[in-house]
Image (cartoon, rainbow, N blue to C red):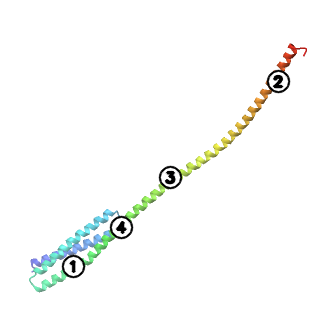
Amino acid sequence: MASSTDVHVRICAQEIIKYDLEIKALVQDIRDCSGPQYSLMELNSQIKEKFNKLRLRIQDLEQMAIEQDRETDRLAVQAETESQRRQMVRKVTKESLVETSGNITESLMSISRMMAEQVKQSEDTIGTLATSSRTVQETNEEFKSMTGTIHLGRKLILKYNRRELTDKLLIFLALALFFATVLYILKKRLFPFI
């Protein structure tokens, strides 16, 4: 009949195996995770929690090995404890790798966000430049049409200035002719003998 110590050793070994499988499943979840940073951090904290529980159960198993009455049982439990401890050391290395990969993932996501912001700013700048370019082209077209209008106005002003000069000369000649005619008539009427 199995003693209660053997039952406790088996239960502890089964819990160690359970935690080991849960850690492996969580590591696989991290490998498969493509989600946001907080989900990676959550999985990472779950792995740390499972490692702590695994560490405690291995310590319990170690304590049970010390408490064994028979030397063969004690050596068997110590061998199992040492085996579990070695496996845990390899898993701790995996845990640090997972944490490092999580940090790298966080850095890459941060860089990705920064690049997305830069692309957005570039798109905004290109849109602003395109709008400014259209405005400059429209203003240039308006200046061209205004230049044509100004040249036409200048020609018209010069033409009216010439007509004004011509009109003044004609008025002056008409007045001179009028006064000459008035003087001639006055001379003939008032001074017929001259």
Which amino acid type corresponds to the residue marked 1 in the rendered image?
Arg
Q: Nearer the viewer, residue 146 or 59?
A: 146
Mark-to-mark CA distance, 3 and 4? 34 Å
Point out the frontmost of discs 1 and 4. 4
Q: Where's residue 76, x and y in %?
A: 16, 84
Mark-to-mark CA distance, 1 and 4? 29 Å
The local secondary structure at tag 4 comes to: helix
Whether the residues at callouts 4 and 2 have beta carbons within 8 Å, the answer is no
Question: Sequence order check: which comes first, mark 3 or mark 4?
Answer: 4
Q: Where's residue 28, x and y in %?
A: 31, 71
Point out the frontmost of discs 1 and 2. 2
Which amino acid type corresponds to the residue marked 3 in the rendered image?
Thr
Label 1 environment density (alpha carbons within 10 Å; few <14, some 14–19, many ≥20): some
Task: State which quarter of the image contains the N terminus.
Answer: bottom left
Q: Which residue was labeled with disc 4?
A: 105
Mark-to-mark CA distance, 3 and 1? 64 Å
Q: Which residue was labeled with disc 2?
A: 177
Whether the residues at callouts 3 and 2 have beta carbons within 8 Å, the answer is no
Q: Which residue was labeled with disc 1?
A: 85
The quadrant in which residue 54 appears is bottom left
Q: Where's residue 90, x and y in %?
A: 27, 78
Whether the residues at callouts 3 and 4 have beta carbons within 8 Å, the answer is no
The local secondary structure at tag 2 comes to: helix
Residue at figure coordinates x 78%, y 30% from the top left? 169
Q: Which residue was labeled with disc 3?
A: 128
Which amino acid type corresponds to the residue marked 2 in the rendered image?
Leu
Which amino acid type corresponds to the residue marked 4 in the rendered image?
Thr
Question: Sequence order check: which comes first, mark 4 or mark 2?
Answer: 4
